[in-house]
C-alpha cells in the first residue's frame, strides 16, 4: 500500500491527468507518526504544483492535487449542490450546504509546504513509512493540531460577505468538534462533555456529529 503514497505513483497519476483533472488522496492521521505524515505530504506536493488540504473526518484528511489552479467558484459549487443526488449524499455525512462544504478547507500549497518542511518524500526505492518506528501513543493528538494550525480562510470566488461569514461559522463548529474529540483522546472527560453539549446546542442536527458523539452528547 505504501506505493500508493510514493512520489513515483503521483508522477504516474499526473502524467495521466486531463488538463482540468484532479487527484484526491486519502491522508490517514493516526496510522503513522507526525514526521511520517510530513513525508507523505512531501511526496504529494513534490509532484502537484497546486495542492490543497481538506478535512473529511476526525481521523483523516484529503489532499487534492492538480496541474492547474483550483478555483473555489461559489456559484458553480452552489449549482452542483443543487443536484439532488449530490446534496443527498453530502447531507448524509453532515455537509448540508455549500458553506459547510467549503468550511472543510484547511490550507493551500503554502501551508502544506510549511508542514512538510525538510521531510524526505516516500519513493518506490525508499518507502520510508514501511520501516518507520512504531506509532507513538495518541499520535493523532500531535498530528491533527499541527495540521489544523495551518488553517486559512478559503480563497472564495464569487462569494458575498454573508456567504464568507457563514463559511466561517461552519468552520467554528468543525473546530469545536475537533477540539472536543482531542479532549476525549487526552482523557479530559469534563472538557469533552462541556464542548459536546455546546456543539449539540449549536449544530445538533448534523448527522455526522450525532453519529460520532452518540445519542447522549446533548445531555
Image: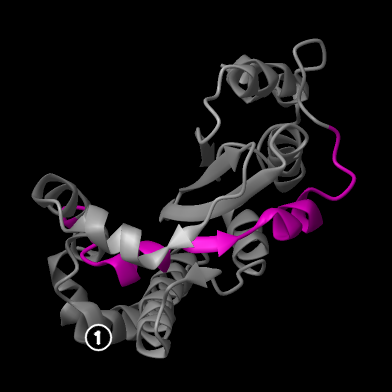
Horizontal side, residue 112 vs residue 16: left or right = right
Horizontal side, residue 104 vs residue 42: left or right = left
| Quadrant in the picture for the N terminus | top right
Give the residues in magenta.
Answer: 91-120
Q: Is residue 133 visible?
A: yes
Q: Residue 148: percent from the left, percent from the top? A: 59, 66
Tell me if residue 12 comes above or below residue 161 in the rendering: above
Tell me if residue 36 comes above or below residue 188 in the rendering: above
Q: Which residue is mark 1?
A: 202
Q: Residue 115: percent from the left, percent from the top? A: 76, 55
Q: Residue 59: percent from the left, percent from the top? A: 46, 49
Horizontal side, residue 51 vs residue 115: left or right = left
Residue placed most toward the observer, 186 or 132? 132
Q: Is residue 98 magenta?
A: yes
Name the image quarter holding residue 205.
Answer: bottom left
Q: Residue 2: percent from the left, percent from the top? A: 63, 19
Tell me if residue 94 comes above or below residue 39 in the rendering: below
| Quadrant in the picture for the C terminus | bottom left
Amino acid at each position: 500500500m505504501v506505493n500508493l503514497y510514493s512520489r513515483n505513483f503521483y508522477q504516474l497519476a499526473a502524467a495521466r491527468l486531463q488538463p482540468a483533472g484532479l487527484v484526491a488522496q486519502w491522508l490517514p492521521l493516526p496510522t503513522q507518526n507526525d514526521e511520517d505524515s510530513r513525508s507523505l505530504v512531501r511526496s504529494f506536493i513534490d509532484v502537484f504544483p497546486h495542492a490543497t488540504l481538506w478535512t473529511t473526518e476526525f481521523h483523516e484528511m484529503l489532499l487534492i492535487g492538480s496541474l492547474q489552479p483550483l478555483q473555489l467558484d461559489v456559484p458553480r459549487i452552489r449549482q452542483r449542490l443543487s443536484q439532488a443526488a449530490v446534496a443527498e449524499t453530502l447531507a448524509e455525512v453532515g455537509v448540508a450546504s455549500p458553506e459547510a462544504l467549503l468550511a472543510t478547507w484547511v490550507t493551500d500549497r503554502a501551508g502544506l509546504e510549511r508542514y512538510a518542511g525538510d521531510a524526505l518524500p516516500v519513493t518506490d526505492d525508499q518507502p520510508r513509512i514501511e520501516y518507520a518506528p512504531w506509532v507513538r501513543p495518541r499520535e493523532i493528538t500531535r498530528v491533527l493540531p499541527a495540521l489544523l494550525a495551518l488553517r486559512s480562510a478559503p480563497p472564495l470566488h464569487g462569494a458575498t460577505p454573508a456567504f464568507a461569514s457563514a463559511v466561517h461559522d461552519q468552520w467554528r463548529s468543525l473546530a469545536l468538534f475537533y477540539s472536543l474529540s482531542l479532549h476525549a483522546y487526552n482523557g479530559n472527560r469534563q472538557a469533552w462533555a462541556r464542548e459536546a453539549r455546546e456543539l449539540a446546542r449549536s449544530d445538533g442536527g448534523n448527522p455526522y456529529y450525532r453519529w460520532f458523539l452518540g445519542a447522549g452528547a446533548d445531555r
